[in-house]
Amino acid sequence: MTRNEMNLVNMFEAVDWFLASNVELLKGYQPIVESHDRITQGLGVIEGLSEAQSTDTKVQTKLKNSEKKALDEKMIKVSDAMSAVAAATNNQELKLIADWPRSLVNRLRENDYYIKVQQVYKAALPLAGDLEVWSVSMDDIEALNTLSASLKQRTPDRRNTVVISKQASTELRSNIATLNKELKDTLDKLMKPFATINPTLYGQYSNARTVVDLAATQKPKEDDSTKDTTTDTKK
């Protein structure tokens, strides 16, 4: 949510609170009651969208990096043991699979990396007994498969998170605009008569309708003191 959007939502909440606080005074004015219902519902939608928008893709990235590191370590451990077995048995085919540059773990394209992991995994399975001598357990071998599968899932998860966040941002802007229009085109006009009927109540409404730039109030600039941020409810 942008700063301007946050400022508007804070104003919507202030208006919602004003209407809720004066429900007894306003309950005889059905159009105002209905407008209040729309505002409350709109704020609920905005809150849900705001949560979806703020979904942190960094979490998925950190998890992916962590699993990639663990998989790299297993790949090196199993490959080194396989290389030793290949040397001991003069198995040239196994040597070609096991002896690969360590830089490949970060240099290979993602899909090629998974292919290499599966190649090492399938070659290691029938050698489980021989690899035990070199401190490689069956769990180490199976970890190549399970970590690889989990890591592959992280990419679509992160993409889905980004898509959800972007869609929420679009819907959030639309709902904020709709709620702002509700206030300007409907509630402001419904409250106008109270400038005469109940000036105190109308003054409270006008205060609630003030859009305050929270960031600006935290770090005021010299020329901000003359800036009028009050929404004109009398137009």
Image (spheres, rainbow, N blue to C red):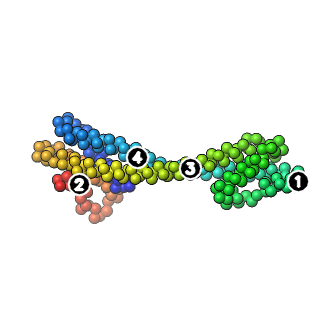
Q: Amino acid at mark 4?
A: Leu
Question: Within the image, what quadrant is residue 20 found in?
Answer: top left
Q: Amino acid at mark 1?
A: Asn
Mark 2: secondary structure: loop
Q: Horizontal and vertical percent for residue 230?
A: 23, 55
Asked if residue 232 shows in the view, the reply is: yes
At horizontal 70% and vertical 46% (from top left) the residue drawn is 144
Q: Horizontal and vertical percent for residue 102?
A: 73, 58
At horizontal 26% and vertical 48% (from top left) the residue drawn is 182
- Dot 1 and dot 4 residues touching (CB under 8 Å): no
- Marks 1 and 3 sit apart, C-alpha to C-alpha, by 42 Å
Label drawn at residue 90: 1
Left/right placement of residue 71 relative to residue 3 reads right
Labels 2 and 1: the sequence-earlier one: 1
Mark 3: secondary structure: helix
- Marks 2 and 4 sit apart, C-alpha to C-alpha, by 25 Å
Q: Disc 4 marks which residue?
A: 49
Asked if residue 199 shows in the view, the reply is: no
- Marks 1 and 4 sit apart, C-alpha to C-alpha, by 62 Å
Q: Horizontal and vertical percent for residue 168?
A: 42, 49
Mark 4: secondary structure: helix
- In the current view of this chain or complex, which residue is farthest to the bottom? 223
At horizontal 34% and vertical 49% (from top left) the residue drawn is 175
Query: Callout 4: few (<14), some (14-19), or many (20+) C-alpha neighbours within 10 Å?
Result: many
Labels 1 and 3: the sequence-earlier one: 1
Q: Amino acid at mark 3?
A: Pro
Label drawn at residue 231: 2
